[in-house]
Image: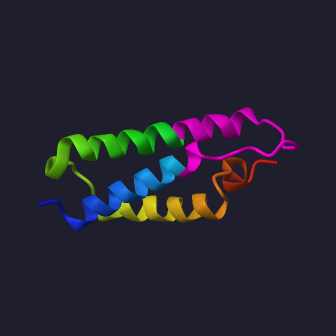
Amino acid sequence: MHSLVTILTLVACVAICVRLLTYHRPADARHRHGASWCAWLLIASTGGQALHILLAGAAAQVTAWNLGVLIVLAVLTYRARGNVARLMRFN
C-alpha cells in the first residue's frame, strides 16, 4: 500500500509536468532562453520524479517537505498558466 504522501507527490509532479508541456506561447510573446531552460529543467525533474515513484512504488522515498514544495510549485504553475517566464518573473 502506498502512503498518501507518495500518491500526492506523484499527482503534483504529473500536474506540473503536464501543465508545462501543454503551454502554448502567444504569437506576440518573446522567446526567453533562460525561461525555456528553467521550463525544461522543471519538466525533466518533475517527470523524472513521477517516473521514479511509478517504478519504485512503495520503496520511493518522499517526504512531506518534498510534497509541500511540489504543491506550492503546482499552484504557482497553474496560476501562471504554464508560463515559466511569468512564474519566475523574468522581464
Q: Quadrant of residue 32?
A: top right
Give the vertical position of 39 relative to 8 (above or below): above
Q: Is 65 positioned to the left or the right of 72 in the image?
A: left
Q: Can residue 54 be seen from the camera position used here?
A: yes
Q: Quadrant of the N terminus?
A: bottom left
Query: Considering depth in this image, is 24 or 77 the residue closer to the camera?
Result: 24
Image position of 6 (left or right of 17): left
Residue 51, percent from left and from top: 32, 41
The stretch drawn in magenta includes residue 32: yes
Against 88, residue 3 (above or below) is below
Which stretch is magenta?
Answer: 19-41
Rendering coords of residue 41 (x, y %): 53, 37
Taking the image as drawn, is residue 66 in sight? no
Give the residue at x 25% y 45%.
54
Identify which residue is drawn at 44% across, 60% down: 69
Q: Is residue 83 above or below residue 80?
A: above
Which residue is drawn at the image coordinates 76% and 48% (left, top)? 90
Left or right of residue 45: residue 50? left
Q: Is residue 64 above or below residue 18?
A: below
